[in-house]
Image (cartoon, grey):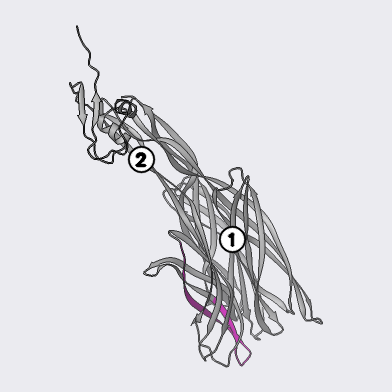
């Protein structure tokens, strides 16, 4: 039995990995009381080797603290890091796309120094060639159907964003952080267009007091992409590589002009849906055919749901507070959340967190960590969740309790999986018995189509249709099929 096959060659997302690594930085003895500490990490590379993805980058630590004289100060340091994510699937021909984020920071005093340790989490997507072999023809009678395969096209680009705004008079900018909210991913002919906002959070000195405020800076990035077309799906990530802030203070007028310059990096993946004319079923009219089936899966991105929700409530506190404390600033707001399934449907459950800085009656400052739980309904299935926390504020209505409010911008990105089941091979079996009858009457199953009937009769669909021109499909109860066999007459 002659069998013909073809090989599909494409490029797609092959696997996703997660990894963690700890990065540590030491500050000197001048740091007495740590108020806030942040870590901003940027990857400078990710290489795939046999059995691992090796990644490396830089982590920038920023600490706001009180010194021995209760003066609020700041210190910054940077460290380089490298680590590896182990996985047997990895091999050098793959391309790694990785994103890093600070998941947790711990501070400890050891000897004369203060050590800040950041736990960095990495999301790694591996892209590479995807191939599979499928039956294309031969001596078999085959059924061909178009099957869908998602192929990936990687693109990237850089952009600048800037802003200038006025505030009340500031003595010094102590700390800032930037979070990206990607609100639009649009494929146009030859272009992947990304739109969104960078939420800039600033902790500053205003005289002897601390203050905090936010600023939304819009951006638009257009990346040339040959694979982009109207209707194609795509996913993207925008990262802030660097931020430069310049403050021009005018004490006489009681105001300050802040100029911001942001360097943005964008990485995108455009998913093209390719149709493969593959054999999904087959049989032999003369022999039993033992078919070999394979299921080929490809992944991409589905619908993206976005929800904006205002939340409020009583917070869990990391330390005590009372009416003698003055609330000064809320900074470093962030969230942890997951998609949950319950009796009420699908929700995004998580906790919004921030650092509250208060000043005691003795003039010293201290930090209290706030945690505000939330549960927000959303329409999403098998989705990755990201939450941006905006405008978090705190107040003490009852002594010892803090109530907080915040706006959440939730994005749920659904994972799309396309599965194609096709015939990848065939082994020839025993010869089929041959009937001596010139004509046979066959009673098929109700509901069968032409292919199912032809396979049962071991005749081609064209031959079945030619011999039974009046038959209707799907088969109705009680219908009969006539099978004619050509007989050789010897005389």
Q: Which image quarter is the C terminus in?
A: top left
Query: In the rendered structure, does residue 358 fall within the stretch colored magenta?
Result: yes
Residue at the spot 68% in from the left edge and 62% down from the top edge: 262
Residue at the spot 64% in from the left edge and 60% down from the top edge: 241
For the question of whether residue 58 can be seen, the reply is: no
Q: Name the residue under label 1.
A: 182
**From what the image shows, is residue 479 above or below residue 330?**
above
Residue at the extreme right of the image, as rendered: 252
Query: In the rendered structure, does residue 432 fall within the stretch colored magenta?
Result: no
Q: Quadrant of residue 290?
A: top left
For the question of whether residue 270 can be seen, the reply is: yes
Q: Which of 241 and 491 is in front in this view?
A: 491
Q: Distance between the residues labelled 1 and 2?
A: 38 Å
Residue 126 lies left or right of residue 454; in this view the side is right
Return the x and y of residue 346 as percentages of the image width and height: 42, 66
Residue at the spot 58% in from the left edge and 43% down from the top edge: 227
Decide which of tag 1 and tag 2 comes sooner along the chain.
1
Residue 449 lies left or right of residue 221; in this view the side is left
Q: Mark 2 points at which residue?
A: 294
**From what the image shows, is residue 447 above or below residue 24?**
above
Badge 2 crowding class, 10 Å Cα cut-off, few under 14, some 14 to 19, many 20 or more, is some
Residue 300 lies left or right of residue 201; in this view the side is left
Return the x and y of residue 407 as percentages of the image width and height: 56, 73
Read off the magenta span: 354-379
Residue at the spot 35% in from the left edge and 40% down from the top edge: 294
Q: How many labels does the image show?
A: 2
Residue 420 lies left or right of residue 258; in this view the side is left
Residue at the extreme left of the image, as rendered: 436
**From what the image shows, is residue 452 above or below residue 168?**
above
């Amino acid at each position: 039995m002659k069998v013909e096959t073809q090989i599909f060659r494409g490029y797609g997302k092959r696997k996703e990995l997660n990894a963690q690594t700890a990065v540590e930085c030491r500050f000197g003895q001048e740091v007495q009381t740590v108020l806030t500490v942040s870590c901003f990490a940027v990857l400078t590379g990710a290489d795939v080797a046999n059995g691992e993805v090796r990644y490396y980058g830089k982590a920038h630590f920023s600490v706001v603290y009180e010194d021995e004289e209760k003066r609020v100060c700041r210190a910054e340091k940077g460290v380089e890091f490298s680590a590896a994510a182990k996985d047997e699937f990895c091999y050098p021909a793959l391309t790694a796309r990785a994103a890093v984020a600070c998941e947790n920071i711990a501070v400890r005093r050891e000897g004369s120094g203060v050590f800040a340790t950041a736990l960095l989490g990495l999301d790694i997507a591996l892209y590479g060639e995807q191939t599979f072999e499928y039956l294309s023809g031969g001596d078999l009678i085959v059924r061909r159907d178009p099957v869908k395969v998602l192929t990936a096209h990687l693109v990237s680009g850089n952009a600048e964003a800037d802003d200038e705004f006025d505030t009340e008079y500031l003595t010094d900018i102590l700390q800032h952080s930037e979070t990206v909210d990607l609100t639009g991913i649009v494929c146009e002919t030859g272009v992947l267009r990304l739109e969104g906002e960078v939420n800039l959070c600033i902790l500053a000195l205003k005289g002897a007091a601390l203050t905090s405020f936010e600023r939304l800076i819009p951006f638009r990035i257009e990346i040339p992409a040959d694979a982009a077309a109207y209707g194609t799906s795509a996913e993207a990530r925008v990262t802030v590589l660097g931020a430069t802030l310049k403050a021009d203070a005018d004490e006489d007028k009681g105001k300050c002009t802040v100029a911001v310059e942001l360097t943005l990096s964008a990485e995108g993946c455009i998913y093209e849906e390719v149709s493969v004319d593959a054999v999904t079923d087959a049989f032999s009219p003369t022999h039993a055919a033992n078919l070999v089936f394979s299921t080929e899966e490809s992944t991409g991105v589905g619908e993206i749901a976005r929800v904006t929700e205002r939340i409020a409530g009583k917070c869990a506190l990391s330390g005590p507070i009372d009416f003698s404390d003055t609330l000064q600033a809320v900074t470093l707001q962030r969230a942890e959340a997951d998609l949950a399934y319950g009796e009420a449907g699908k929700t995004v459950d998580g906790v919004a967190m921030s650092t509250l800085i208060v000043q005691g009656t003795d003039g010293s400052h201290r930090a209290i960590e706030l945690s505000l739980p939330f549960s927000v309904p959303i329409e999403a299935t098998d989705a990755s969740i990201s939450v941006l926390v905006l405008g978090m504020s705190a107040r003490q209505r009852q002594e010892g309790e803090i109530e907080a409010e915040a706006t959440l911008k939730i994005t749920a990105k659904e994972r799309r999986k396309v599965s194609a089941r096709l015939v990848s091979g065939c082994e020839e079996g025993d010869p089929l018995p041959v009937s001596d009858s010139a004509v046979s009457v066959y009673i098929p199953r109700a509901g069968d189509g032409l292919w199912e009937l032809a396979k049962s009769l071991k005749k081609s669909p064209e031959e079945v249709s030619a011999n039974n021109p009046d038959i209707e499909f799907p088969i109705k109860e009680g219908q009969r099929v006539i099978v004619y066999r050509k007989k050789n007459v010897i005389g």
